[in-house]
Image (cartoon, rainbow, N blue to C red):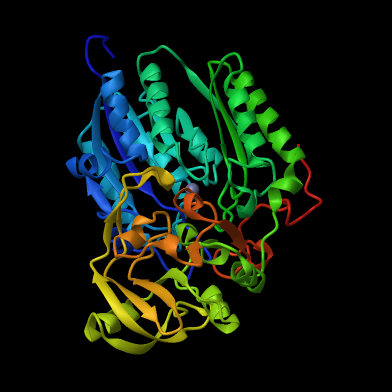
């Protein structure tokens, strides 16, 4: 491109973490309503409105456009909560519109693809790779493409082949979406201006990093990320990333992956990727799993605690990883053991409707939760008073996982039960990533003995500051930490720790 013109950069994405074991199919309807963002499908100026003041990947693109002096053209962004395989209609319509806009509004000097990296559609099991390939087909071989990814991406060779660079979050909880997006823009713009010539290498050791070991602030992941940072500082290396992988997507690329981009030197990229992979492989046992408490052990521990709240991380009902959001396993055990003062969300639109028709102040008896499938407990019969009814929209300006800001519980109701528990009954599958979820309906989680947070890592930025103690609770569900409880058909074999005889290199 000529040097006196501002580069014109397209930005677009189809963002989904697909739990292929989930009971929820992901349809066009799922994308239209999302707990993660108020507008599930965003086009043009709407993207600016929903992200400029947040801390998401798109927020980073906007910041970089100002800093590096390019014209950012936000085209299309669709994202919904983690859930099951994306159906054919949803993929065809969303990917079709994206590619139409890219074609129609071109030509471009460069493209930013905002993908999650663990999306699976009925037809394209490596959906992110397919989006990269289609983008390349639209813009041709000479327009640089940089794709940003979540740290839970299952990175594939197809994603690498059809992009000039991948930039993956480096933190879990994800606090660096914006920072990584700025880095992606820097790589893209230097490539557009002809200052660098990125060549990439991917290394996929046959190993899975277990969900209980994925917090990058703690060992063993702390050292893995240090290796990524060391690799990034090697001579000729422009960028290094790794994917922790997302274990509930049953695809061949599921697992850990290591990636490096060098300036014109493919051997340097390959060496860096292999070095990181080898070092992680040596720690594969530590990275596979970590101790968690049974539900009973966790409830007893909370009951004996001198101070509260004890925050229980409900591993099996990890909404942010595609589970039901209506698990009653902890609630039922707490009632059975006589624990008091528990607060939690339960996704149960039917129960919300009962509360709404009864009205604020009414006492009702109803069944709550456990309605999606048999993996997340049975419905629990409760009697309680409806305290609050809300449209469920809430906003969090403080840093939360992945930098989201405008959340939506859907229509929701607060029920105070006669045995001293508080249930926030919600309609969407919004994760427990923000205390504002409770504050917005008058609940102060700090005042409870037990706070159930559905998730493993994503609730930590919100709940660590108020927790007397945080416990990992090994509940069953669509996101159980026990991967042997799932019937995989497409994953690689051998793969550690499923097959302990797996070898690398
Ligand atoms: Zn993630």
Could you say where residue 206 lies in the image, as x and y percent from the top left?
70, 45
Q: Residue furthest front?
A: 306
Residue 236 location in percent, x, y?
A: 57, 14
Location of residue 39 with respect to 334 vertically, above or below: above
Foreground residue among 187 and 158? 187
Residue 390 seen in this snapshot: yes
Task: Give residue 358's quadrant in the image.
Answer: bottom left
Q: Quadrant of the N terminus?
A: top left
Between 147 and 408, the residue placed more toward the observer is 408
The structure residue drawn at horizontal position 26% and vertical position 70%, both measured from the top left corner, is: 411
Which residue appears farthest toward the left when viewing the image? 45
Q: Horizontal and vertical percent for residue 95?
A: 33, 49
Residue 350 in view in this figure: no
- Residue occupying the point 32% across, 49% down: 396
- 104 lies above or below 348: above
Vertical side of 482 occupied by 216: above or below? above
Residue sitting at the far right: 501
Quarter of the image with the C terminus is top right
Residue 167 located left or right of residue 354: right
Q: Depth check: give the residue in front, 313 or 62.
A: 313
């Amino acid at each position: 491109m000529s040097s006196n013109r501002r580069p014109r950069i397209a930005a677009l994405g189809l963002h989904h973490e697909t739990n292929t074991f989930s009971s929820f199919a992901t349809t066009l309807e799922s994308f239209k309503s999302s707990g993660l963002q108020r507008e599930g499908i965003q086009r043009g100026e709407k993207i600016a409105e929903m992200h400029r003041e947040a801390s998401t990947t798109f927020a980073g693109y906007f910041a970089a456009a100002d800093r590096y002096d390019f014209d950012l053209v936000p085209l299309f962004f669709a994202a919904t909560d983690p859930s099951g395989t994306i159906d054919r209609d949803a993929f065809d319509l969303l990917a079709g519109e994206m590619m139409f806009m890219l074609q129609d509004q071109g030509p471009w000097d460069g493209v930013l693809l905002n993908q999650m990296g663990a999306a699976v559609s009925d037809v394209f099991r490596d959906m992110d790779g397919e989006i990269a390939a289609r983008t390349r087909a639209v813009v041709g071989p000479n327009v640089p493409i940089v794709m940003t990814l979540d740290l839970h991406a299952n990175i594939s060779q197809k994603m690498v082949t059809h992009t000039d660079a991948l930039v993956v979050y480096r933190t879990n909880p994800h606090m660096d979406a914006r920072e990584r997006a700025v880095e992606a823009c820097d790589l893209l713009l230097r490539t557009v201006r002809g200052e660098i010539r990125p060549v990439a290498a991917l290394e996929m050791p046959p190993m899975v990093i277990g969900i209980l070991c994925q917090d990058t602030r703690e060992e063993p992941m702390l050292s893995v990320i240090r290796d990524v940072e060391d690799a990034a500082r090697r001579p000729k290396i422009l960028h290094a990333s790794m994917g922790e992988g997302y274990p509930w997507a049953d695809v061949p690329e599921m697992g850990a992956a290591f990636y490096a981009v060098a300036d014109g030197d493919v051997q340097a990229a390959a060496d860096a990727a292999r070095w990181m992979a080898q070092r992680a492989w040596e720690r594969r046992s530590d990275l596979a799993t970590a101790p968690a408490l049974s539900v009973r052990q966790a409830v007893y521990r909370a009951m004996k605690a001198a101070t509260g709240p004890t925050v229980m991380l409900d591993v099996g009902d990890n909404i942010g990883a595609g589970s039901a959001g209506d698990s009653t396993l902890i609630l039922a055990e707490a009632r059975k053991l006589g624990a008091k003062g528990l607060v939690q969300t339960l996704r149960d639109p039917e129960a919300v409707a009962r509360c709404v028709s009864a009205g604020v102040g009414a006492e009702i008896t109803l069944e709550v939760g456990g309605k999606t499938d048999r993996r997340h407990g049975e419905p629990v019969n409760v009697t309680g008073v409806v305290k609050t009814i809300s449209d469920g929209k809430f906003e969090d300006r403080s840093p939360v996982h992945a930098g989201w800001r405008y959340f939506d519980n859907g229509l929701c109701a607060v029920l105070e039960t006669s045995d001293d528990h508080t249930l926030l009954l919600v309609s969407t599958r919004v994760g427990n990533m923000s205390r504002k979820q409770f504050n917005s309906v008058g609940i102060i989680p700090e005042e409870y003995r037990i706070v159930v947070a559905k998730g493993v890592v994503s609730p930590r930025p919100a709940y660590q500051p108020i927790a007397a103690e945080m416990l990992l609770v090994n509940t069953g569900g669509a996101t159980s930490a026990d991967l042997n409880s799932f019937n995989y058909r497409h994953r690689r074999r051998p793969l550690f720790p499923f097959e302990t005889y797996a070898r690398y290199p």
